[in-house]
Amino acid sequence: MIKYTLVIKMKSLHIILNNTKNTRSLSTLINREGRHIKPHALIRSDALNKLDKKDIDKLCDDYKLKRVIDLRCLNEIQNNPDVQMNGVEHISNPILPNERVGVTKKGNPEEDFIDFIEAIQTNGAQSSEEFMKKVYKEIVESEFSNQAYSKFLNILLEEVPGATLWHCSAGKDRAGFATILVLYLLDFSIEDILNDYLATNQYYQSSIDEFLCKFGEEYKETLETVFGVSILYMDVLFANINALYGSIDHYIEHVLGFSKEKKEALKRIYLEE
């Protein structure tokens, strides 16, 4: 069984919307230099395909949303497009290709999810853990993913008069690594990066409980794997980066092509003085 620690002390701000689970502003975080991320600047989230008017008003009026970067596969985007918001730029930047196992295939997200859960459950908890480890290996090994993360970081260098939000489907793996990269470049401690990453487990606990009622207690480990994140995944992520590229700094600068000069520019844009 995957063991993860629920974060007790939250630092990122949970933005409570009617139709997302894992939308969070990073503006409350303080880096190792004691500097805050600017208000209304950076937001991470799960999918935005079910937003209602109140959700839109909160994001656009309260959080000054101006740009959305969608990290989902193209078929996920086509089958469940984001709700469009006036004055908000939407950018498609898939982290994984369409043929990736575990993403939308039928065009019905509910049916796809049930099929996915049943397939993982059939193969056992160890299989579900291995599936997630494979995803985390792929997002740092494949040229497709590396090019997408490079594009993502460079988009952030293009200033907008408000907040940028990035998301995938659950806002935890593809968007989670995107957030890890951003916080690392903005000089946050590994402890704070880990805390923000693990916060997903709290926000999806209600979903786990809901689906336990539908599937049964025997699905508990599978559902925790699918909805949650684990320190184990971070270990896999950094172990692969170190094995392939020597360090995360080398990976960022030489694989993603994000130079030290770009890092300083990112800090100027998003950190308060």
Image (cartoon, rainbow, N blue to C red):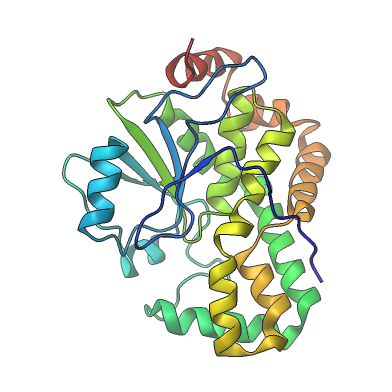
**Image point (35%, 33%), residue name:** 163
**Closest to the observer: 108 or 14?**
14
User: Residue sitting at 58 percent across and 23 percent down?
Assistant: 186
| Image location of residue 55, percent across then percent down | 28, 54
* Residue at horizontal 56 percent and vertical 64 percent from the top: 204
Residue 115 located left or right of residue 192: left
Q: Residue furthest top?
A: 273
Percent of width and height locating residue 217: 69, 87
Q: Nearer the viewer, residue 4 or 185?
A: 4
Asked if one can make out residue 145 in the rendered structure from this viewpoint, the answer is yes
Residue that extends furthest to the front in the rendered view of this protein? 8
Percent of width and height locating residue 97: 50, 59
Q: Quadrant of the N terminus?
A: bottom right
181 lies above or below 271: below
Q: Is residue 26 left or right of residue 41?
A: right
Q: Quadrant of residue 127?
A: bottom right
Q: Is residue 20 left or right of residue 12?
A: left
Indicate the quadrant where residue 50 lies: bottom left
Residue 146 in sight from this viewpoint: no
Is residue 177 shown above or below 50?
above
Q: Position of residue 246 (x, y in %)?
A: 81, 31
| Residue at 57 percent of width and 87 percent of height | 213
Report how many numbered discs are placed on residues in the image.
Answer: 0
Q: Which residue is more in the foreground, 58 or 71?
A: 58
On screen, 75 above or below 136?
Answer: below
Q: Is residue 25 above or below residue 212?
A: above
